[in-house]
Image (cartoon, rainbow, N blue to C red):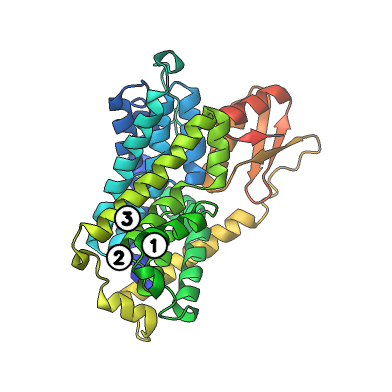
């Protein structure tokens, strides 16, 4: 499975890095204000290719909301972005075939637009402003030449992004391997002919848990090989990355329980609708698994050179980012400093956002944010309320 995915994942990481370095997030964010359908569609179109999982998209969308984006546009962005991205689209093509790779972003787009419009109906025009939106972009205000941007693209794509989705990718591969090896071939046969029941079962499992868009692919593949329908696999690919308790709780706090309920409803209804569309209306041959992919996941013992090299590179990057994430840096040695407990950080993107937010507070001389412990150590004489306000404006809780 790793060999099947790794070349496409590395390509996706590279494209994601280029998007991050050469297309400022502030360019995207300017189009997310207003309550009309245009802002909702723009938000969905922007969100589909962005390689952000839900832990990364939450602070970004909340910062946009607090700086002028409407609830409708923010909801559309929140639904579309974690479901897919350039990296997961490439990996989906590799493991599940072109039909899944095409329908998945279309489903994310349609679901996001529907959810955004649904929320927008309950939102008054006075609730949204047209103020300029400050996106969560760690490079804003910096003038960089082509080579600096290229280095930043490689760093973001192959270090930050790998660190962000790496743990979930590994978890997804392990779960998929366990399902493939230990679950009997006929375990899901009874549900195979009952797509609605199997979709409900997958939703019950997928909504509480968290798995990123790329990490959900091997799990979906293993379930299809065990007899579940392709439509059920799509439900997992949509609901797993987009809906989880952490997202629901934070959206409830920032946008209200009604908007959070509409957000969850849009994901569930959209996933079920597209799942049934695949199972009942589209040709089954479009979603037939590649025999070579199925063979490699069951009996393959021979490994092609290029995919194996890509797998080795990916594993090396995962190890490097794991060490970087959990190895203490101990840069700050000053005796007089303050510590803040940051809640909601799950990836290097979150870490960079918090670091930038605190560094901009008056009186801060130095700041170090530890992703593994959730602690921010600050040297200087900043006012506590200003640090707390800066972190919350970035979309995180703080003590």
96 sits to left or right of 215? left
Going from N to C along the chain, the mark reached first, 3 or 2, is 2
Q: Which residue is mark 2?
A: 96
Image coords of residue 61 (percent x, y): 46, 33
Q: Quadrant of the C terminus?
A: top right
Q: Secondary structure at mark 3?
A: helix
Is 64 displayed left or right of 285 in the figure?
right
Q: Mark 2–mark 1 contact, CB under 8 Å? A: yes
> Where's residue 356, x and y in %?
56, 33
**Mark closer to the chain start, 1 or 3:** 1
Q: Quadrant of the N terminus?
A: bottom left
The circle on residue 275 is 3
Q: Is residue 223 above or below residue 292?
A: above
Q: Secondary structure at mark 2?
A: helix
For residue 309, which quarter of the picture? bottom left
- Residue drawn at point x = 33 percent, y = 30 percent: 40
Label 1: which secondary element? helix
- Residue 364 position (above or below residue 83): above
Tell me whether circle 3 and circle 2 mark residues in contact (CB < 8 Å). no
Q: Which residue is mark 1?
A: 217
Q: Residues within 10 Å of mark 3 (few under 14, many from 20)?
A: many
Tell me how far mark 1 sits from mark 3, CA to CA. 15 Å
Q: Residues within 10 Å of mark 2 (few under 14, many from 20)?
A: many
Task: Look at the picture and state if 26 lies above or below 317.
Answer: above
Residue 255, horizontal then vertical, whole percent: 51, 28
The residue mark sitting in front, 3 or 2, is 3
Q: Is residue 262 visible?
A: yes
């Amino acid at each position: 499975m790793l060999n099947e995915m790794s070349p496409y994942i590395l390509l996706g990481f590279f494209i994601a890095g280029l998007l991050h370095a050469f297309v400022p997030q502030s360019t995207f964010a300017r189009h997310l204000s207003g309550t009309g359908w245009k802002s909702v569609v723009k938000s969905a179109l922007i969100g589909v290719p962005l390689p952000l999982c839900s832990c990364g998209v939450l602070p970004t969308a909340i910062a946009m909301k607090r700086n002028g984006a409407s609830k409708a546009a923010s909801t559309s962005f929140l639904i579309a972005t974690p479901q897919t991205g350039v990296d997961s689209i490439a990996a989906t093509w590799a493991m599940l075939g072109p039909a899944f790779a095409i329908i998945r972003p279309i489903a994310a787009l349609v679901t996001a637009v529907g959810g955004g419009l649904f929320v927008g109906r309950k939102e008054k025009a006075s609730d949204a402003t047209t103020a300029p939106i400050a996106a969560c972009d760690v490079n804003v205000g910096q003038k960089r030449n082509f080579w600096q941007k290229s280095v930043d693209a490689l760093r973001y794509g192959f270090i930050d992004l790998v660190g962000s989705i790496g743990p979930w990718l590994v978890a997804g591969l392990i779960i998929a391997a366990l399902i493939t090896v230990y679950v009997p071939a006929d375990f899901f046969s009874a549900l195979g002919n009952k797509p609605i029941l199997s979709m409900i079962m997958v939703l019950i499992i997928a909504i509480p848990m968290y798995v990123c868009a790329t990490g959900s692919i091997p799990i979906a593949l293993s379930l299809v090989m065990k007899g579940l329908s392709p439509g059920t696999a799509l439900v997992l690919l949509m609901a797993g990355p987009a809906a989880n308790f952490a997202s629901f709780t934070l959206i409830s706090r920032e946008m209200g329980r009604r908007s959070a309920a509409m957000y969850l409803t849009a994901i569930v209804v959209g996933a079920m609708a597209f799942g049934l569309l695949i199972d009942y209306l589209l040709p089954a041959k479009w979603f037939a698994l590649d025999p070579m992919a199925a063979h490699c996941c069951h009996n393959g013992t021979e490994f092609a050179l290029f995919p194996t090299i890509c797998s080795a590179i990916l594993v090396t990057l995962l190890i490097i980012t794991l060490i970087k994430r959990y190895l203490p840096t101990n840069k700050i040695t000053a005796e007089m400093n303050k510590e803040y407990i940051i809640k909601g950080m799950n990836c290097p993107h979150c870490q960079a956002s918090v670091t930038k937010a605190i560094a901009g507070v008056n009186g801060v001389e130095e700041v170090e944010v530890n992703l593994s412990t959730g602690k921010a150590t600050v040297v200087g004489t900043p006012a506590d309320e200003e640090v707390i306000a800066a972190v919350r404006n970035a979309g995180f809780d703080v003590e």
